[in-house]
Amino acid sequence: MIDPIAVEAPQVPAQPVPAHVGRSYWRAAFSRLRRNRIGMASGALLLFFVLVALTAPLIAGFITHTNYSSQDLTNTFASPLSPGHLLGTDDLGRDTLTRLLFGAQVSMGIGFLAVFVSLAIGAAVGLVAGYYGGLIDGLLMRFVDVILAIPSIFLFILMSILFKPSTVTLALIIASVGWGSIARLVRGEVLSVRTRDFMVATRALGASDARLIIRHLLPNVLHVLIVFGSLYLGSVILTEAALDFLGLGINPPIPSWGNMLTNSETFFFHSRWLVLWPGVTIFLAVLAANLFGNAVRDAFDPRLR
Amino acid sequence: MLKYLLSRVVATIPVVIGVTVVTFVVMHIAAGSYVPGLDLNPNLKPEDEEAIKRYLGLDRPWPEQYLTWIGGVIHGDFGRSMIDGSLVSRHIGDRLPATLELTVTAILLGVLISIPLGVTGALRRGSKLDHALTAMSVGGFAIPGFWLGLMLILFFSVQLQAWGLPFLPSGGVMTPGTGGGDLLDRIVHLIMPATVLSFVYLSIWSRFTRSSMLEVLAQDYVRTARAKGMSERRVVYLHALRNAVIPLVTLVGLELPSLVAGGLIVEVVFSWPGIGKLLYERAIQTDYSTVLGITTFAALLVVAGNLLADFLYAFLDPRIRYA
């Protein structure tokens, strides 16, 4: 028999920290984030939703023993805690918990993808506009003005009719508007970094524009992207749920938190839970995303505190 | 001052042109020369279809169509519906009052409640009340508006009625057939949608007032006012608050566009016959030209709203004008 304690990894002596290495900005930020209890708790909740989204088919297969579309018309509007249905069933006898699990795939998938694409486009536009200035800056920023002037919900509806969206296209539709504000923020930050001595020095060394932008400007605006991205996630989840609810996003049979609420009020007297669960789930996910975003902002941009 | 205002107006012109071009182009990528309903008629001959498209001007090149359309927009004509040929501008005119009734009420509610809440939070910074207000605003910001609307309807309209208690109407601006002369009836209809719509404003603006107020209270002139022996009430409400709400003006100004667009989901949930619901209904029927007209109208309003906020800000804060 092997003593479990003995097979633990051998104790490595702590690496001596060189005296000249101060706490870098990033390490300080991460340590501030770790010490923020609400931030870490909401981060954990967000991680939970992500894990649920990733493992939804497994959970459905091994724990709830059903899938999101299997109907049971003999067991409609089952109440929560009924046998085999922890959160009850809907008007077609489908398991509510399983549908919520798969709904997480839609919300989280679209949420993260839309944030990522917005950040990528917004950063590229903001960096180029801020770095080159002049006519390029003027044109790009006027275009941003135009995009932001058209009410985003109208644009979403317009594009939803056009594309009959899938998960990916819906994320792209949301991102096609979301990059505007990021571009503005990044540009503003670039304007203040551009004139610093290190930029002038690097250019004097003969660095190309591309190298200056990617190697020297981008790391200096990265905190803007991290902060905005984490605050933006919650609003994407809300927008997406609203579009699904209106029937302009992800449509049945694929369940999403938004489309589970469509027409749910008609069943109010059969089962109140059908209205409650998806709403509470959206609320928790958005709350987790927003609180985590606040914590990230406090950690990475202490001036804003 | 005049120079500043003029420069703002001039800077707006390219945005106005851009907005109309972008909405027009997106719409035409979406619709092409599709006319809703034509494909449903099996007796329609190809030459009839061509004739209809020619009549609607869809056979001409895009730039020409754009110029014709924009010429109308300049004169307040936002085109005609693809479905029934009705004037989009007339639809907008019919629906605008209901939308404004809802959104103006919501914004007023938001301002009137969020400022006292924000000031209270700032004055009692770190107290239990402050924490509770913070929690409420964080929570309020995460509630999906359409779901809150559903829950309110289910409780205040459905459940109360089921219990035989007085209940709130679940939708519409007034009881059908009353003609809208009854003010009380209108207010009763307004309660729930306005509450839902003002919720988000409340969450954002009360936070904003709080932090803005905290910033102002730390200023030297507030200390000076206190040192002169001015009463705390005068310091807070006369000196601090007046400066703290200036940035809020911009924030509220930025919400002016939502006067038209912001209530879309609430309008749908509460069957509120406003612009947002109109756009939604027409979008589902693929009435592209109506959607285009409404979107353009709303976007122009956004531009105008931003301009107005700029003006208001310059008027309230002299530093802007001379910068």
Image (spheres, coloured by chain):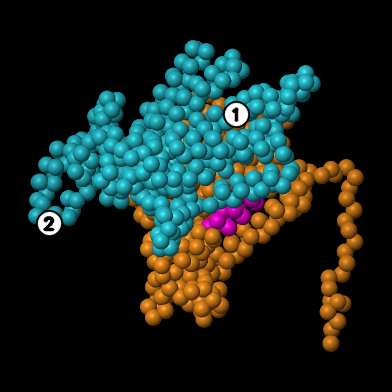
Chain colours: A orange, B cyan
Which chain does the numbered disc 1 sit on? B
Both on one chain, marks 1 and 2? yes
Residue at screen point 82% across, 44% down: A23
Parent chain of label 2: B
The image position of residue B190, as x and y in percent, is 41, 44
The percent position of residue A138, horizontal first and vertical second, equals 50, 26
Instruction: Please give the name of the residue rendered at 47% of the width and 39% of the height, measured from the top-left corner.
Output: B106
- Left-right relation of B19 to B205: left
Q: Nearer the viewer, residue B194 or B73?
A: B194
* Image quadrant where one finds the N terminus of chain A: bottom right
Identity of the residue drawn at 36% across and 39% down: B183
Q: CA distance from mark 1 to mark 2?
A: 63 Å
Write down the quadrant of residue B55 in the picture: top left
Whether residue A29 is visible to the viewer of this picture, yes or no, is yes
Kindly indicate the quadrant of the structure image that contains residue A108: bottom right
Q: Label 2 is placed on what type of residue? A: Pro
Residue beneath disc 1: B245
Q: Secondary structure at mark 1?
A: loop
> Is B28 displayed left or right of B312 in the figure?
left
Residue extending farthest front: B165
**Mark 1 surroundings: few (<14), some (14-19) or many (≥20) residues within 10 A:** some
Sequence-first tag of 1 and 2? 2
Dominant secondary structure (helix, strand or loop) of the stretch shown in magenta: helix
Circle 2 residues within 10 Å: few <14, some 14–19, many ≥20? few
Residue B159: x and y in percent read: 43, 61
Magenta-colored span? A282-292
State the residue in front, B316 or B30: B316
Which quarter of the figure has residue B97? top left
Amino acid type, residue under disc 1 in the picture: Val
What residue is shown with label 2?
Answer: B42
Position in image of residue A141 (x %, y %): 50, 30
